[in-house]
Amino acid sequence: MSSASTLHFAVIGDPIGHSKSPLMHNAAFRALGIDADYTAVHVTREGLPAFLESARTSLSGFNITVPHKNAVIPFLDGITPRAALAGSVNTVSVRDGKLFGDTTDAAGLERAVQEVFGLPLKGANVCILGCGGVVRALAFHLADAGCARLRILNRTAEKAALLTDEILKHAPALDCGFAALDDLPSVRNALDGSDLVIQCTSLGLHEGDGSPVDPALIPSSACLFDTIYRETDILVRCRERGLRVSGGLPMLVHQGAESFRIWTGREAPVDVMRAAAES
């Protein structure tokens, strides 16, 4: 039951009904005895300004998912350096009526990869499939984490080239390159020697979707991390080949745990959040 002292949190997006975040955060609040609740709120692009204005007085914090991670920034009172570098925000804290943005996407990925594969990002050869959504945050984080090589494969080569140029300005010593997904020789070369392949395209969100690249091109020694939660074609086929694979749920859990820490100042009960997300 809510009371006058209850803290209110939310996740917004369009669509939002599929979100596991309320399950995770409400379980975490209960586990630590925090008087707070967390709900999913459907917010359209047109409704974003009105929601943000009301959040200044009605919420203590909120998460943001598609399609608002970039659109929210102009409405905020401040953002962290890592959010500015990523160009996106997925976590907002409300303090004295002001909105402060941060991103936990890349931290969530790094902790998930370490947890599932035991693979440090430092010194790793990494290949990212796709160039939208979370990719910018991941790419800059990988550069700062000291990965040895980074390749970005995208349907539109121009978009990947622009991001590659920005990364190289930020980290000039990094071995960073790009290729179009339909350029088979370049794709083969980019995937060769990869320690970690991160699937960030939308392929796999819907039943019957194929893979962004031929899974047979991914080295058998590589780990595949798919940011989509369901069993995608590329994940299933890589598993069949004997690769170590993971869907996106561990990343979601660790993203949420970092948001929880930002809001409460307390370490999140990760095992509790994971169990709730898997339920």
Image (tube, rainbow, N blue to C red):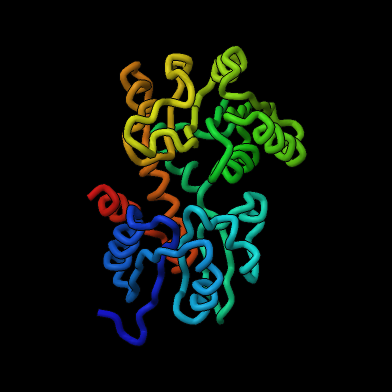
Give the side of residue 160 with respect to residue 27, left or right: right
Give the side of residue 138 with respect to residue 264, left or right: right
Query: Is residue 269 in view?
Result: no
Q: Give the residue at x 54% y 45%.
A: 133
Q: Residue 184: percent from the left, percent from the top?
A: 57, 14
Q: Residue furthest front?
A: 46
Query: Is residue 58 in view?
Result: yes
Q: How many marks?
A: 0
Dividing the picture into quadrants, the one containing residue 209 is: top left
The front one of 5 and 237 is 237
Dividing the picture into quadrants, the one containing residue 121 is: top right
User: The N terminus appears in which quarter of the rendering?
Assistant: bottom left
Does residue 11 lie above or below 85 as drawn? Answer: below
Give the side of residue 94 with respect to residue 39, left or right: right
Q: Residue 106: percent from the left, percent from the top?
A: 53, 46
Q: Residue furthest left?
A: 279
Q: Residue 207: percent from the left, percent from the top?
A: 32, 34
Dividing the picture into quadrants, the one containing residue 49 is: bottom right
Q: Give the residue at x 40% y 63%.
A: 42
Q: Give the residue at x 56% y 41%.
A: 132
Does residue 250 lie above or below 83 as drawn? Answer: above
Q: Residue 3: percent from the left, percent from the top?
A: 31, 85
Q: Give the residue at x 71% y 36%.
A: 162
Q: Residue furthest top?
A: 185
Does residue 192 lie above or below 279 as drawn? Answer: above
